[in-house]
């Protein structure tokens, strides 16, 4: 058992009333799902309890619990990232050969009829946008929302999820390619 | 024109996505602009991408702000934790 070197102590019987809201808020802004965030908070408390003998008392109880939650979020991200059997997003570019990296004919961006000039920004369009974001694979959606909705710094996301910045841009790229195509299919082609 | 300015549509659209967050380097923007002069599909992508960014900033508000644990959930969590605390103190 590590020696207690700090003055802080753990009081697990007070964890829910003191930290559940704080940890839940931290988790929900990252995973965007109520039940998953709730599960992560629960797992954090259970892991904290299991590992309470490792608490040396130097950090506050709250900081210690957040560090556990952060690891849970990385684990969660790795899990959705490696989930097998899920359909990979097909890239709209030739993947090899002479034309590698060029648009596939069937995926070429279509004419959106000077969309920007028209007053089409309404509730219906918003629901198409929501639908298209919901349809992103979870591993892309999570990074996309952290970057686009919560305006996290690239470096912050990379640290939190344990990915490289080039990895992050590949994910954002895939998300935005898919988002563009989805908006085109569900709004401009109608 | 030097070959190092030539990039594929895949690379060009990746840089275009970076520019939406103001994070493309100067050199990347030079390559992108050069590519856009030659490629109408990527020009279309670029315009649509700018438009999507405007939509996102207009409609994509923080939807988690009002998402909280309700009392019942906290109570359940408390009960589960109590059982765990008991189990651990037994060992």
Image (spheres, helix red, strand yellow):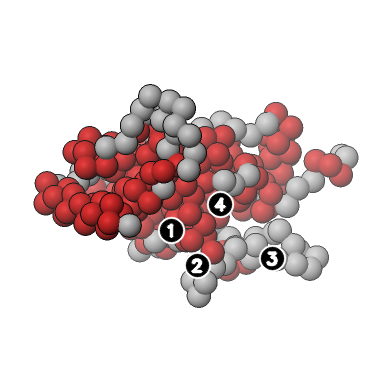
The reply to whether dot 3 and dot 4 touch (C-beta < 8 Å) is no
Q: Residue at x 59, y 33 (%)?
A: B23
Nearest to the observer: residue A88 or residue A37: A37
The earlier-in-sequence mark between 1 and 4 is 1
The residue under the point 48% across, 61% down is: A79
Of the two numbered discs 3 and 4 in the rendering, the one whose residue sits closer to the viewer: 4
* Labels 1 and 3 touching (C-beta < 8 A): no
Q: Which label's residue is closer to the chain start, 3 or 4?
A: 3
Secondary structure of residue under mark 2: loop
- How crowded pointer 2 is (Cα within 10 Å; few <14, some 14-19, many 20+) is rated as few
Q: CA distance from mark 3 to mark 4?
A: 18 Å
Left or right of A99? Residue A130 is: left
Residue closer to the observer: A172 or A100: A172
Can I make out residue A45 in this image? yes
Q: Tag 1's secondary structure?
A: helix
Q: Which residue is mark 3?
A: A94
Instruction: Check the picture and name the quadrant holding the C terminus of chain A.
Output: bottom left
Q: CA distance from mark 2 to mark 4?
A: 15 Å
Q: Quadrant of residue B54?
A: top left
Dot 1 surroundings within 10 Å: few (below 14), some, or many (20 or more)?
Answer: some
- Per the image, the residue denoted by label 1 is A138
The residue identified by callout 2 is A83
Please tell me whether residue A61 is drawn above or below residue A168 in the rendered image: above
In the image, which is nearer the foreground, mark 1 or mark 3? 1
Q: Earlier in the sequence, mark 1 or mark 3?
A: 3
**Badge 1: chain ID:** A
Closest to the observer, A117 or A1: A1
Quick one: label 1 or label 2, which is nearer the N terminus? 2
Which residue lies under the disc numbered 4? A171
Marks 3 and 4: same chain? yes
């Amino acid at each position: 058992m590590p020696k207690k070197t700090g003055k802080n102590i753990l009081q697990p019987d007070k964890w829910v009333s003191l930290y559940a809201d704080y940890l839940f808020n931290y988790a929900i802004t990252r995973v965007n799902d109520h039940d998953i965030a709730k599960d992560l908070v629960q797992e954090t408390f259970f892991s904290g309890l299991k590992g309470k003998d490792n608490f040396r008392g130097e950090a506050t109880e709250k900081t210690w619990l957040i560090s556990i939650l952060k690891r849970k979020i990385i684990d969660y991200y790795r899990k959705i990232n490696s989930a097998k059997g899920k359909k990979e997003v097909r890239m709209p570019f030739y993947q090899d050969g002479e034309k590698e990296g060029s648009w596939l004919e069937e995926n070429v961006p279509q004419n959106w009829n000077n969309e920007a000039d028209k007053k089409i920004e309404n509730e219906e369009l918003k629901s198409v946008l929501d639908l298209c974001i919901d349809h992103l694979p979870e591993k892309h959606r999570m990074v996309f929302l952290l970057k686009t909705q919560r305006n996290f710094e690239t470096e912050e996301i990379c640290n939190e999820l344990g990915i490289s910045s080039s990895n992050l841009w590949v994910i954002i790229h895939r998300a935005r390619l898919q988002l563009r195509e989805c908006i085109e299919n569900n709004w401009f082609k109608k | 024109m030097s070959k190092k300015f030539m990039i594929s549509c895949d690379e060009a659209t990746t840089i275009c996505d970076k520019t939406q967050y103001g994070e493309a380097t100067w050199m990347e923007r030079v390559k992108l602009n050069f590519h856009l002069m030659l490629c109408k599909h990527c020009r279309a992508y670029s315009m649509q991408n700018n438009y999507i960014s405007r939509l996102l900033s207009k409609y994509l508000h923080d939807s988690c702000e009002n998402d909280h644990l309700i009392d019942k959930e906290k109570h359940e969590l408390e009960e589960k934790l109590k059982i765990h605390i008991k189990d651990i103190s037994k060992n």
